[in-house]
Amino acid sequence: MIPEGQIQYQKPPRPGSLIAAFVIGLIGSLLELIFGILLVTASYFVASWIIGNISSSLVEYLAYFLETAATVIGAVYIISGGIMLLLWIFAFIGKEGARIALIVILSIDLLIQLFSLNLINFILDIVLISLISNRSVAEYCNPRYQQYRQFNYNQVYNQIKVDQNVRENVRENVRDEKYTPVLENRTVPYILTPKTFAVLISESGPLRDQTFKLNPKNSYIIGRAGDITIPSEDKTTSREHAKIRDENGNFVIYDMGSTNHTYVNGERVDRKILLDGDRIKIGQNIFRFQIVRGK
């Protein structure tokens, strides 16, 4: 068991582009809201003054018509400004649905500004869409990414003075909490995305110097059978020795009842979540598991 309060998690910082978009969007939404309120208020007082000071049926009908039109337009501005204000606030605190809704609304407004030849608002919409569509904001707002918090594993060592066995317990408990530690300066955390994959680099054995790419959502079997994904002619490797597959954004290795077992970092395993830099021993082959992040 890990002593409660010993591990400090560091939440990912809010992206600067999200902050910039929020400030611009907040100002724009407030201005739209204020404009709508002023338009409704002004139309009421102007219409009242005209009706009270000009005794003409035609002028009265015209005043009522203009007041109604201005009130409707003002109400549209108030509702639009209020909705955008709420969406910007929810996007700022990391709600993915609000971010998607903003992208859709801004894209529609972009077309409107293009056809109305409003260059300033057209450029402003492009800037806002670019700011909230970049990768850092998408990852910050995505609930799946929010499960993975980056922290320095050395902080754990500074607070908990334990031997190697307890280190492994710390490592497994952290993984169970869906957080990824930095172990011995390994480049983690990782979460598999369409642009992120892993490789098995054979460091020794019959497959030495060969590299095997592992794509997300796929399964890979290592063994001596003819139709195996990663075949090895090593006699100490079983026909179907081990399987590696993607589970919830992490690669997991399973021993498939092999004769000589499967080892990760020198430890026999039946099932193991692989971390960046892990060394896997299958028969005479030793592989290094490595995450490759696409750009």
Image (cartoon, helix red, strand yellow):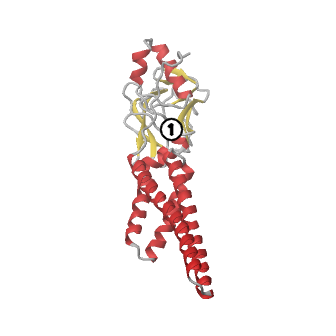
Other residues around mark 1 within 10 Å, as few (<14) / some (14–19) / many (≥20): some
Residue sitting at x 60%, y 30%: 256
Q: Secondary structure at mark 1?
A: strand
Q: Amino acid at mark 1?
A: Pro
Q: Is residue 222 visible?
A: no
Quadrant of res 271 = top right
Residue sitting at x 47%, y 44%: 140
How far across and down, in percent of the image, does residue 62 sit?
59, 83
Residue toward you, 88 or 42: 42
The image shows residue 60, relative to residue 129, as above or below, that is below
Left or right for 242, reference 205? right
The image shows residue 213, relative to residue 262, as above or below, that is below
Residue that mark 1 sits on: 231
Residue toward you, 162 or 267: 162
Residue toward you, 52 or 184: 52
How far across and down, in percent of the image, does residue 233 sit?
48, 34
How far across and down, in percent of the image, does residue 60 sit?
61, 82
How far across and down, in percent of the image, does residue 74 sit?
55, 68
Which quadrant of the figure contains the N terminus? top right
Left or right for 43, reference 182? right
Q: How many marks?
A: 1
Q: Is residue 160 visible?
A: yes
Residue toward you, 97 or 288: 97
Quadrant of res 269 = top right
Residue sitting at x 51%, y 31%: 179
Residue sitting at x 57%, y 70%: 44
Quadrant of res 63 = bottom right
